[in-house]
Image (tube, rainbow, N blue to C red):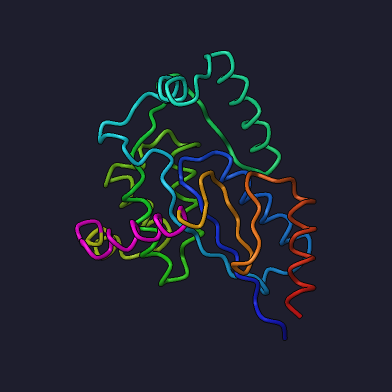
Amino acid sequence: MADKIKIDIVSDVVCPWCTIGFKRLEKAIADLGIQDQVEIEWQPFELNPNMPVEGQNVQEHIAEKYGSTLEQQKESQQHMVEAGAELGFTFDYYDEMRMGNTFDAHVLLDYAKDFGKQTELNMRLTTAFFSERKDVSKREVLKQALKDVGLNAEEALAKLDDDDARYEVKSKESSWQSLGVSSVPTIVFNRKSAVTGAQPVDVFKQVLTEVIKNNK
């Protein structure tokens, strides 16, 4: 039996293309029938590490950060809505949507890894933000997400006040940045090769097929 393919997904829970990229990767894995040959680990990346507690209106934020006009934003959002729909994921954009700080979410994802629930929690938080109009920086939203995936919410939330747990996530973020990761999603295969962006399903299939060949 060949070794498992280790896939690191460097991403943020409020990154739409990270969701689309993962869903396409997931489809490629399913199409190839290699679900049992793959081990996925989510790695932290904050799109907006300096986002204040109160967050910021998404339209203002995108205009400020990328210089996009409202028209350009609406066009981009429509593109994401369509890409999500093809993969069974709902992007529900609305004018009052706010971008929040995601550091706490990453601390909880690190906690979830020990219980094999990282992917489940990641998708739960992503769904809460993009499909259910919830603020994933708020503890009550995080608490509900933990419960929804069957994790011990009290134990997990205690990690948010644990300096070691917070430091661990900060050092992982720094480590990936020092390796050159500056945009997400960045999907790394066996810590040897990487693709960035939400590539088409066929591209992921080609990459996975190549990795399987080299794994033997």
Q: Is residue 215 visible?
A: yes
For the N terminus, the image quarter is: bottom right
Residue under the image location 68 percent in, 36 percent down: 83
Relative side of 154 to 74, left or right:
left
* Residue 99: percent from left, percent from top: 39, 32
Determine which quarter of the picture holds residue 175.
bottom left
- Where does the magenta region start and end? 160-177
Q: Is residue 121 visible?
A: no
Determine which quarter of the picture holds residue 147.
bottom left
Q: Nearer the viewer, residue 86 or 194?
A: 194
Q: Nearer the viewer, residue 143 or 43?
A: 43
Residue under the image location 44 percent in, 49 percent down: 45
Tell me if residue 146 comes above or below residue 130 in the rendering. below
* Residue 151: percent from left, percent from top: 36, 64
Tell me if residue 70 comes above or below residue 102 in the rendering. above
Q: Is residue 119 magenta?
A: no
Tell me if residue 142 comes above or below residue 52 in the rendering. below
Q: Nearer the viewer, residue 162 or 89?
A: 162
* Residue 137: percent from left, percent from top: 32, 42
